Amino acid sequence: MPKQKTNSSAKKRMRVTGSGKIMREGVNNQHKFEHKSSAQKRRVGADQVITGGDRKVARKLLGKLKGR
């Protein structure tokens, strides 16, 4: 049976923590920071946990089928 391949775009955007949570970067956190308030920049700078139905899809894309 062939090996499961990790989706290349997913591995650049998400990471799995040691406890099994999947983290992603906040949205609107790439450019044009001069137009954003300090509060918004702080808020989007923090990584966020992927929850709900998206979590199952993300695990499959990352090749993490077993476990949590």
Image (tube, rainbow, N blue to C red):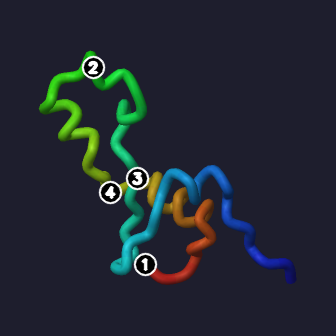
**Which mark lies nearer to you, 4 or 2?**
2
Q: Looking at this rendering, what residue extends furthest in the top direction?
A: 35
Mark 2: secondary structure: helix
Could you say where residue 56 lies in the image, as x and y percent from the top left? 50, 62
Which mark is first along the chain, 1 or 3? 3
Which mark is first along the chain, 4 or 3? 3
Mark 4: secondary structure: strand
* Badge 4: residue crowd in 10 Å (few <14, some 14–19, many ≥20): some
Please give the residue where the numbered disc 1 appears in the rendered image.
Answer: 68
Which mark is first along the chain, 2 or 4? 2
Label 3 and label 1: CA atoms lie apart by 18 Å
Compared with residue 25, is residue 57 higher up or lower down, i.e. above or below?
A: below
**Which mark lies nearer to you, 2 or 1?**
2
Please give the residue where the numbered disc 2 appears in the rendered image.
Answer: 34
**Which mark lies nearer to you, 4 or 1?**
4
Label 3 and label 4: CA atoms lie apart by 6 Å
Please give the residue where the numbered disc 3 appears in the rendered image.
Answer: 24
Compared with residue 49, is residue 68 higher up or lower down, i.e. above or below?
A: below
Please give the residue where the numbered disc 4 appears in the rendered image.
Answer: 49
Residue found at x 62% / y 70%: 63
- Identified by mark 2, the residue type is Glu
Residue 64, quarter of the rendered image: bottom right
- Identified by mark 3, the residue type is Arg
